[in-house]
Each structure stands twice: as structure tokens, then as C-alpha cells.
Image: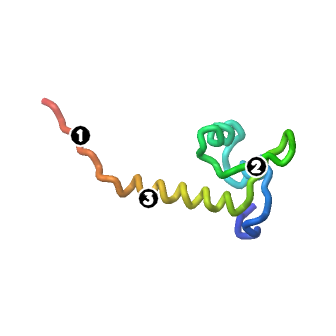
Amino acid sequence: MSTLEYSNDTVLSFTQWLKLAGIGKTSGLRMRSAGQAPRFWQISPNRIATTVGEHRAWLASRDEAKCQLNESPTRRRHRTA
């Protein structure tokens, strides 16, 4: 499954999103509770869903965060004798 095949409005179930993101269920649940996953909506009492557009925005935000980490100044460790 590739996001290139779908429009931003395509709805993904939580399970479909896990497969697309390449992460396990426990990690996905942990990321959602920590606010580190795309926005999800409750579509029925036992189902949540997101969109391909939310997934793409989530990926872009993760890439941006990685870039900011790489640009931060490195700290040198001082050796003590």
C-alpha cells in the first residue's frame, strides 16, 4: 500500500494506518495516547479512522522534527583525567 495511489480524502481505519505506517498495534496506540500520531476521528463506537492527508501531514512533521534535531549544535563531551 502506497499513499501515492490515494487522494488526501481517502479514509483509513486504524488497522490500515498501522500497516501503511509500518508500525505495530501497541506502538500505534502508544503514539496516539502521546499525541504523536495523525488525528483520528471516532466513526462508530468501536472504530476510529484518519485520512491519507492526515497521514501525509504526520509524515512531514516527523521529517521536519528529524531535520531540526540534526541541525541542533552538538555538545562536546569533556574528558576528565
Location of the C terminus (image quadrant)? top left
Image coords of residue 49 (percent x, y) = 78, 51
Confirm or deny contact between disc 1 and disc 2 (CB under 8 A): no
**Kind of residue indicated by mark 2:** Trp
The residue that disc 1 covers is 77
Inter-mark Cα distance, 3 to 1: 23 Å
Where's residue 51, x and y in %?
74, 58
Disc 2 vs disc 3: which is toward the camera? 2
Residue that carries the numbered disc 2 in the rendered image: 41
User: Relative to residue 8, is residue 69 depicted above or below?
Assistant: above
Element marked by disc 3: helix
According to the picture, the residue beneath numbered tag 3 turns out to be 67
Q: Secondary structure at mark 2?
A: strand
Q: Earlier in the sequence, mark 3 or mark 1?
A: 3
Crowd class of label 3 (few under 14; some 14 to 19; many from 20; radius 10 Å)? few
Q: Are marks 3 and 1 in contact (CB under 8 Å)?
A: no
Viewer-nearest residue: 50 or 63:
50
